[in-house]
Image (cartoon, rainbow, N blue to C red):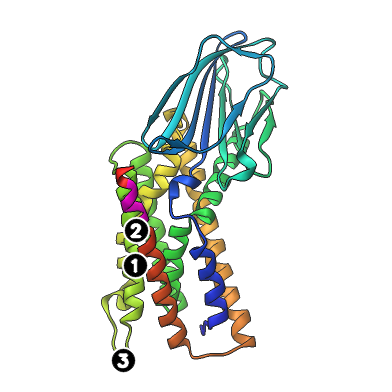
Amino acid sequence: MRPFTLTLLFLLQVFLAAPAFADELRPAYLSIREMRPDEFSVLWKVPAAGDLRLGLYLQLPDTCVPKAEPVRLIENASYSERWTAMCNGGLRGRLIAIDGLRSTATDALARIEYRDGSIEIARLTPAAPRFVVAGVQSGWEVAWTYFLLGVDHILSGYDHLLFVFALILLINDFWMLTKTITAFTLAHSVTLAGASLGYFSLPQQPVEATIALSIAFVASELIKQRPGERRLSESYPWVVAFAFGLLHGFGFAGALKETGLPQTDVPVALLTFNLGVEAGQLLFVASVWIAFSVFSRLITVPAGPARVASAYLIGAISTLWFIARISSFAV
């Protein structure tokens, strides 16, 4: 692999323009539970930082009227509203929309639980901020929704992608890279499952700050590379990937768990969300390798200087993220 400046600058510019806060990319969450005929309990959650919330607003059908003012609360980096709505004629066939979603980089997950025990899941995106309530949904449709949520999270999780990108630059051997990515996958799968099931947890903000530091660490290892010398990160990169993968798993779990998903959804959510994360990760790795392969046939420059320059840029980006995330602790 002979990466050159044009490819690296293009990819790194994407990361440099990325948002510093993962909270901005966490999905909003809508939970609707049918309590009695035409009566529904509603929970609406959106990402928040301090007293500031993301400008997303739920629009229920015109036939829905709240029985009382919503109870509003900001905690755990989320703004939530709870209320009971009377919807004449029920929700089936009615339109639910999220105002403001088109102008964000996030999406929203809607979950409707009916009195007969059936569940409907819908994923709303900036391109499709509304849906018509179907009332009937197969298990495959539910699984597919969580799978797409996993793909979307990893492809919009710039910190996770930048870590993987740094690993690609660190490792020249394809099979060693495969082993390293596999170790990263296994590690974050363990903490994703454990944290989502409630066996252990870490505060989300320190996790995100430490994830930024993990990227800076790999960048520093890139800078310290010398011909004829093999550092621990070069000889056993899968160990580094596994160790930091455990940390990144908590970040993935935050995206899944902080939406407020009920425990009844966790088994299918864990499996399909994680499969979506892995599919998006493999898609990213394949895209980078293809880009390197194509551009290296067109323009050839010394790999060493390009790699070092990239390492400094990666370190600068991750350090800026770290500072921004640390400063948010007091917010």
What residue is drawn where x is 30% and y is 67%?
Answer: 239
Quadrant assignment, res 231: bottom left
- In front: label 2 or label 1: 2
Please determine whether, in this image, residue 158 is positioned above or below residue 239. Answer: above
Q: In the rendered image, is residue 245 in sight? A: no
Query: For the residues marked 3 and 1, what is the alpha-carbon distance in whole angstroms?
Result: 23 Å
- Residue 26: where, in percent of width, then height? 48, 43
Q: Are marks 3 and 2 in contact (CB under 8 Å)?
A: no
Quadrant (top left/top right/bottom left/bottom right) for the C terminus: top left
Q: In the rendered image, is residue 262 in sight? A: yes
Q: Are marks 2 and 1 in contact (CB under 8 Å)?
A: yes
Residue type at mark 2?
A: Phe
- Considering depth in this image, is 141 or 168 the residue closer to the camera? 168
Marking on residue 228: 3
Marking on residue 322: 2
Q: Earlier in the sequence, mark 3 or mark 1?
A: 1
Q: Which residues lie in the magenta part?
A: 322-328
- Residue 117: where, in percent of width, then height? 55, 19
- Considering depth in this image, is 116 or 318 the residue closer to the camera? 318
Query: For the residues marked 3 and 2, what is the alpha-carbon distance in whole angstroms?
Result: 32 Å
Mark 1 = which residue? 216
Query: For the residues marked 2 and 1, what is the alpha-carbon distance in whole angstroms?
Result: 9 Å
Task: Find the residue positioned furthest to the right.
Answer: 93
Under circle 3, the secondary element is loop
Residue type at mark 3?
A: Gly
Q: Earlier in the sequence, mark 2 or mark 1?
A: 1
Q: Earlier in the sequence, mark 3 or mark 2?
A: 3
